[in-house]
Image: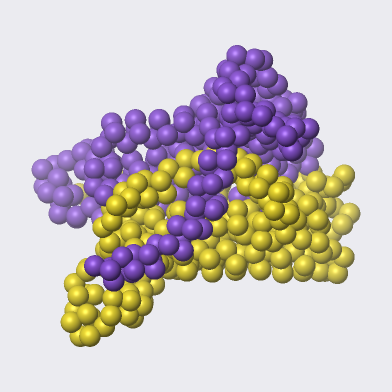
Amino acid sequence: MEKRRLLITFFLAPSFVVLAGVVLYPFLYNVVLSFGNMNLTTIRHWDLIGFRQYVKIFTEPSQPDFYTVFWKTIVWTVVNVFFHVVLGVFLALLLNQKLRGKSIYRTILILPWAIPQYIVALTWRGMFNYEYGSLNIMINKYLGLPAVEWLKSPTEAFLACILTNVWLGFPFMMVIALGAMQSIPHELYEAAAIDGARWWHRIRMITLPLIRPIMVPAITLGTIWTFNNLNIVWLVSNAGEPADNTHILVSFVYKAAFNFYGYSYAAALSMVIFVILLLFSLAFLRTTRATEAAF
Amino acid sequence: MDQQRLTRILATATTHILLVLFAVFAVFPIWQIVNISLRPGDQLLSSTLELIPSNATLENYERLFTETEFLRWIGNSVFVAFAVTATGVVLASTAGYGFSRFRFTGRNFGLLTLLTTQMFPATMLLLPMYIMLITLGLINTFLGVIIVYSATALPFCIWTMKGYYDTIPVSLEEAARIDGCGRFQAFSRIILPLAAPALVITALFSFMTAWSEYIVAAQILQDSQLWTLPLGLKSFEASMSTQWGLYGSASLIVMVPVVLLFLALSRWLVSGLTLGSVKG
């Protein structure tokens, strides 16, 4: 028995110590910070002030407005995840059949996922340039439509971020969906074909229901990643331009912390985001019952 | 019969057309990077689209190595990424095994906590750690970023390893122990080699976390001597008149190795992800 305890310690203690230092302690520190009044001037002598930062988030006007940013984040997440899943599953369906050049298509379509995100963001930012960006050149010269001020007006800048993120996110869902489809036994399709089921029916009755158990956790993960994706919004809009109109919650917190030095305010905002995501994940996984086998 | 053949040919053709369209969509920005990197200095702000720019030249690549700190950034990034990878592999391979094979108090709580950290917004750990690093005097050091990156990558890596160990039958260790192996030997000689695919995923994930990270590095590494690649590349973009030529050539050099690595390992990466999240 003594030996078993020693083994457990050997395997788990190093990680435990490291995680306690770099995850648990900072997390608790963040909780404490969120009840304080720390900013750049009070960093050496700050006090606990209770729930005031939280009250401030929900009741006091901020620049940009918290509720506007909140709704933008919801739109951002829903639109992105929707396109990721729809495009991903659609492409997986196309690839999940006998097809010449299948592995070449698959390789090319994974590329957006393989490229470092900051390069994706900076490259798309260049493509959105008004005069020299390739998108406006296409729109203007080749389609004859008026060029778009992608990065100068709030709606277009937000759209630019979404477009970039849709581009980089669909391969993940495609690969997961394709993996799930390939594990469906072939006999099911044969039986359906004998019963005279058409292509669409086979997809609706066999493919989609059977990839669901794998897609649900992937979608949960994708939603969390998208909700928290600081890279794309921050780098495409160059820190929220124009005039802090292009923010989602995480970029708003990042700005509050590192550009405005409102440390406690930012800590409280982080907590709010975390609780939103936690509640979402619990609700989503409970309704879909995907975690039943998790432990 | 003919009718059926026609439908099939039409369906195949449609499939190919759709896939080609999406392939173009996927490749377009990459082609942009290649294109920009080959443009001669006087045509950087070109407003035409050519597949390969006229007078294509490698001068941007030459300037990148002779006039910028690119080599130093590569050195910095490689150092940080290897440190994070080594930490990730050593800690996750042991902790994952512990979670997979032993039942002890706090096990479920530990696993749930690891999962919960995936919901932390980036600022949740970055801000308190930033303040801690200031207090400890670790701002502007590689150790500072290595610590933050490990905190980001480790929970995911432990889950991946645990999920993979779960798929290896316990009977293998039992057999090894009957043959006289100790518990630890059974782990290091039998199980660890079998878990090679998961180790590769863990290494790749840790490496990519460090290699491609901008947001954290921007706060911690303020001294340009310590810049990692993302900070260097961003500096091309952020200068008064964006140095697109340098940016393009640097981006290409930075992404080619990781893209190749990613493609080579993508099958394993996916099985690791789905095992980690579905089977638990």
Residue A21 position within the rendered picture, expressed as x and y whole percent measured from the top left: 54, 53
Please tell me which residue is depicted at 28% across the width and 31% down the height of the picture: A287
B243 lies left or right of B7: right
Residue A276 position within the rendered picture, expressed as x and y whole percent measured from the top left: 46, 29
B176 lies left or right of A45: left
**Observer-nearest of B217 and A181:** B217
Please tell me which residue is depicted at 29% across the width and 33% down the height of the picture: A286
Residue B262 position within the rendered picture, expressed as x and y whole percent measured from the top left: 51, 63
- In terms of image quadrants, where is residue A135? top right
- Is residue B154 shown above or below B62? above
- Is residue A181 shown above or below A281? below
Colouring convention used in this rendered image of the protein: by chain
Chain in purple on the image: A
In this rendering, does residue B110 appear at all? yes
Please tell me which residue is depicted at 15% across the width and 47% down the height of the picture: A193
Please tell me which residue is depicted at 40% across the width and 39% down the height of the picture: A220
The tint chain B carries is: yellow
- In terms of image quadrants, where is residue A71? top right
Residue B175 position within the rendered picture, expressed as x and y whole percent measured from the top left: 19, 79
In this rendering, does residue A179 appear at all? no
- In terms of image quadrants, where is residue B256? bottom right
**Observer-nearest of A274 and A162:** A274
